[in-house]
Image (cartoon, rainbow, N blue to C red):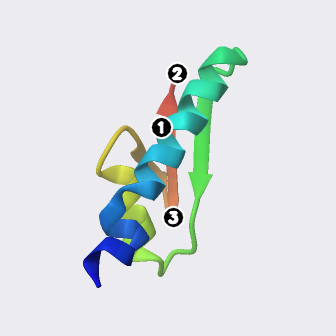
Amino acid sequence: MEGDDPKLAGIGRRLLQEAIQQARAAGCCRITLLTDAGNVAAQEFFWSGWFCAVGDGAAALKL
């Protein structure tokens, strides 16, 4: 059922948005994410929004 799929419900995006807000509030200047090189779905998720690729399986966001 589509309504039960967390990806379709936007939970991951909302969690990431909250983490970014918390990092900014704490005075962080950058967030770096690492994924396994073969985890294409996660990489596409992170790179589809605010993050840019910085290496094999890594993404960063300048705050």
Q: Nearer the viewer, mark 1 or mark 2?
A: 1
Within 10 Å of disc 1 (Cα), the crowding (few <14, some 14-19, many 20+) is few
Asked if labels 3 and 1 touch by Cβ distance under 8 angstroms, the answer is: no
* Residue labelled with disc 1: 17
Mark 3 crowd level (few <14, some 14–19, many ≥20, 10 Å Cα): some
In the picture, measured across the screen, residue 29 lies left or right of residue 40, that is: right
> Given the image, on which type of amino acid does mark 1 rest?
Gln
Disc 2 versus disc 3: distance between alpha carbons? 20 Å
Q: In front: mark 2 or mark 3?
A: 2
Q: Is residue 20 above or below residue 54?
A: above
The answer for how far apart the CA atoms under marks 1 and 2 are is 12 Å
Three-letter code for the amino acid on which mark 2 is drawn: Leu
Q: Residue 7 vs residue 62: left or right?
A: left
Q: Nearer the viewer, mark 1 or mark 3?
A: 1
**Where residue 36 sits: x, y (%)?**
57, 74
Identify the residue at image location x=27%, y=78%. Answer: 2
* In the foreground, 9 or 52: 9
First-in-chain label (2 vs 3): 3
Q: Examine the image and state in which quarter residue 32 appears.
A: top right
Q: Circle 1 sits in a helix, a strand or a loop, which is it?
A: helix
Name the residue: 55% across, 32% down.
20
Which residue is label 2 attached to?
A: 63
Callout 1 touching callout 2 (CB < 8 Å): no
Q: Which mark is residue 57?
A: 3
Residue 3 vs 61, above or below: the answer is: below
Give the left or right position of residue 53, taking residue 31 as reference: left
Q: Secondary structure at mark 3?
A: loop
The structure residue drawn at horizontal position 35% and vertical position 51%, both measured from the top left corner, is: 47
Choose top left, top right, bottom left or bottom right for residue 44. bottom left
Which secondary structure, mark 2? loop
N-term mark: 1 or 3: 1
